[in-house]
Image (cartoon, rainbow, N blue to C red):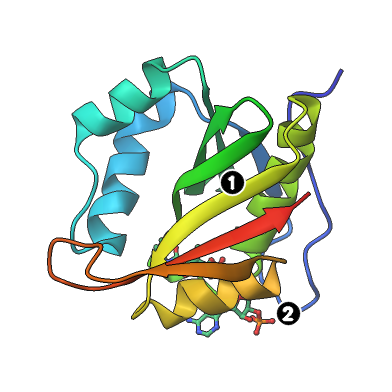
Amino acid sequence: MSLGTTIQMKPTTRHTDTFCRLLTTIDLARVLDIESVAYQEPWSEKKFLDSLDNKNTLASVVLVGGEVVGYLITNLCVDYADILNICIHPEHQRGGLGSLLWRHQIAKLKMHRISSVVLEVRDSNSAALSYYEKNGFKAIDRRNKYYKNGESAIIMRQFI
Ligand SMILES: CC(C)(COP(=O)(O)OP(=O)(O)OC[C@H]1O[C@@H](n2cnc3c(N)ncnc32)[C@H](O)[C@@H]1OP(=O)(O)O)[C@@H](O)C(=O)NCCC(=O)NCCS
């Protein structure tokens, strides 16, 4: 059985050697690098380690030319999953890699009998909102002042 997924990229992408596989602790240093350049409030190393230690975590990475350029972390809860973190290195964004990673993750989630996925996203994060909508999520709720800085969260869901 294949452990990873190689998928044809959209014609606009520069990358041809793209691959998705499960995230392991070996990837952590690179993941922390990406996290620190992509987020204003990055996850700590401990948060990643705790997440990877959790038996309900299913996490994947996307690689270009053998280098990790993005990751997606989901938490499984019976028949649904939460997206805890998804990130593509800023230099690789808008090349279809986030969508590729999501398609890879859907296949893995279905193998765990997951039928729906939920997430929360800052209502100011227009890139992520567009990305989620383009990849089949729909807004189902809003939580006012959800984040520490008083920002609201949009709750989105997709049946897979
Ligand atoms: C959200 C994120 C994962 C998207 O990854 P990506 O690889 O850039 O996404 P894709 O190239 O697959 O984009 C798919 C679609 O999403 C939408 N989209 C993605 N980035 C966008 C942007 N900056 N502005 C507007 N729409 C955007 C577009 O509809 C795009 O399709 P198109 O390029 O054909 O127009 C990436 O922007 C990222 O890592 N952001 C920083 C971390 C983050 O905010 N994570 C989400 C936290 S909830």
Q: Is mark 2 within 8 Å of ligand 1?
A: yes
Residue depicted at x 57% and y 29%: 76
The label on residue 26 is none
Give the residue furthest to the left: 149
* Image x and y of residue 126, in percent: 44, 82
> Considering the numbered disc 2 on the image, is that residue within a helix, a strand or a loop?
loop
Give the vertical position of 18 relative to 47 (above or below).
Answer: below
Does the image show residue 134?
A: yes
Q: Residues within 10 Å of mark 2 (few under 14, many from 20)?
A: few
Q: Residues within 10 Å of mark 1 (few under 14, many from 20)?
A: many
> Considering the numbered disc 1 on the image, is that residue within a helix, a strand or a loop?
strand
12 or 65: which is nearer to us?
12
32 or 151: which is nearer to us?
151
Residue depicted at x 23% and y 53%: 36
Does the image show residue 72?
A: no
- Reading the image, the residue beneath label 2 is 12
Give the vertical position of 4 relative to 89 (above or below).
Answer: above
- Reading the image, the residue beneath label 1 is 62
Q: Looking at the picture, which amino acid does disc 2 mark?
A: Thr
Alpha carbon separation for disc pair 1 and 2: 18 Å
Q: Is residue 146 left or right of residue 153?
A: left
* Image x and y of residue 103, in percent: 74, 51
* Image x and y of residue 138, in percent: 64, 70
Q: Looking at the picture, which amino acid does disc 1 mark?
A: Val
Instruction: Locate the N terminus by quadrant.
Output: top right
Q: Is residue 83 left or right of residue 78?
A: left
